[in-house]
Image (cartoon, rainbow, N blue to C red):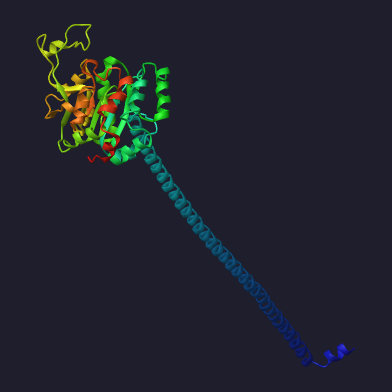
Amino acid sequence: MSFKTRGGGGGGGEVASSKKVVLSRNWALFLCVSSFCAGMLFTNRMWIQPEAKATGKTSTLEEQRTNFKSEDCDQKIVEKHNFNNGLGDVSMDQHGIQEQDEGISDLKIKTSLATDEHESVSHSLPIIGNMESSESTLKRKYFMVIGINTAFSSRKRRDSVRSTWMPQGEKRKKLEEEKGIVIRFVIGHSSTSGGILDRAIEAEEKVHGDFLRLNHIEGYLELSAKTKTYFATAVAMWDAEFYIKVDDDVHVNLGTLGMTLAGHRMKPRVYVGCMKSGPVLARKGVKYHEPEYWKFGEIGNKYFRHATGQLYAISKDLATYISENQNILHKYANEDVSLGSWFIGLDVEHVDNRRLCCGTPPDCEWKAQMGNICVATFDWKCSGVCKSVERIKQVHELCGEGEDALWHSSF
């Protein structure tokens, strides 16, 4: 009924109702748009903030990754630096080891060279008993070296020499130190190396210590070779002014020998002895036979002048000459002839001194009484003191200079 009343109220009511409907629609549209805009605004704000947060998180993550990479890189750089340093240390260690190895190698080479040099010197020198080292003997200067030629069968002769004119023990050492006189029995080796003959000499050497062993095979026909070897060996071992060879059946006054040689010490090439010129013996079977007699001319000719083999002395220059040329020096049957031949053609002064070949008493005794002491005494017919083992003591008592003469002598 009210509806009707509103409608019955005329056309104004209908207009008002229509405006309300339009207004409601507009507001609904406005509200929808507003709601949509508000929703969009809210939605944008909701999405923008998380995006910012995500961006912040991403930035933080990237920064962490960057920092991690940076730290990792720094760590790698540090590790690489440490590794390089380690390599450097290893390289330095390897370099140091290499230097040490090179130093050790050089030391080994020097040691090897020193050992080879020592062995070379040791092999070049003979083996003798209780001898000073080669270095000390080479540095020391001596006045004269006396080599007493001996044989395996001459033990009694050696003992007779030891008991007369050759000082023993401490006196022999004193003779070397104060007077510069070296005395040794000179002998080589037997044809059977290490045989009974060699062992006998070795046992004798242990008692007396007065041998010079040569790298030489003993034999009467090898005396020339033995003489060469003796001089070459003596020069290598002792630096002396004179080198003497004497037989073991000859009596010697050492003080008088020293005074005699001292008068020739300023001469460079001197050859001292009792000079002779005996016949060249061509006939076989005789003593002192010369197989090369034809080199001396017609049969019956004589040798060139040379010192008799019982005792002679040569200066250092001549001994050195023999040592340096021993491989090409010719050897004759007789060693005194060989020695004389080696000096032919050289500028050598031959000194003929008859005091080096006195006869046994009464000859040497008379000369001693007259104050003309002999240097060496022997019998010509025996080429030494006849029966020297029994008689050399008598010769020493009658013709000797006396022990004090040697020690009071000034060379």
Q: Residue at x 18, y 6 (%)?
A: 283
Q: Provide residue 140's location: percent of width, then percent of height.
A: 29, 40
177 w.r.t. 7: above or below: above
- The reply to whether residue 133 is in sight is no
284 w.r.t. 5: above or below: above
- The reply to whether residue 403 is in sight is yes
Q: Residue at x 69, y 81 (%)?
A: 34
| Quadrant assignment for the C terminus | top left
Q: Provide residue 278's location: percent of width, then percent of height.
A: 14, 16
Q: Provide residue 133's location: percent of width, then percent of height.
A: 36, 37
**Quadrant housing residue 116:** top left
Is residue 69 toward the left or the right of residue 208 in the image? Answer: right
User: Closer to the camera, 268 or 85?
Assistant: 268
In this view, the residue farthest toward the top is 284
**Quadrant housing residue 64:** bottom right
| Quadrant assignment for the N terminus | bottom right
User: Closer to the camera, 132 or 65?
Assistant: 132
Q: Residue at x 40, y 40 (%)?
A: 108
User: Closer to the camera, 88 or 11?
Assistant: 88
User: Closer to the camera, 24 or 252?
Assistant: 252
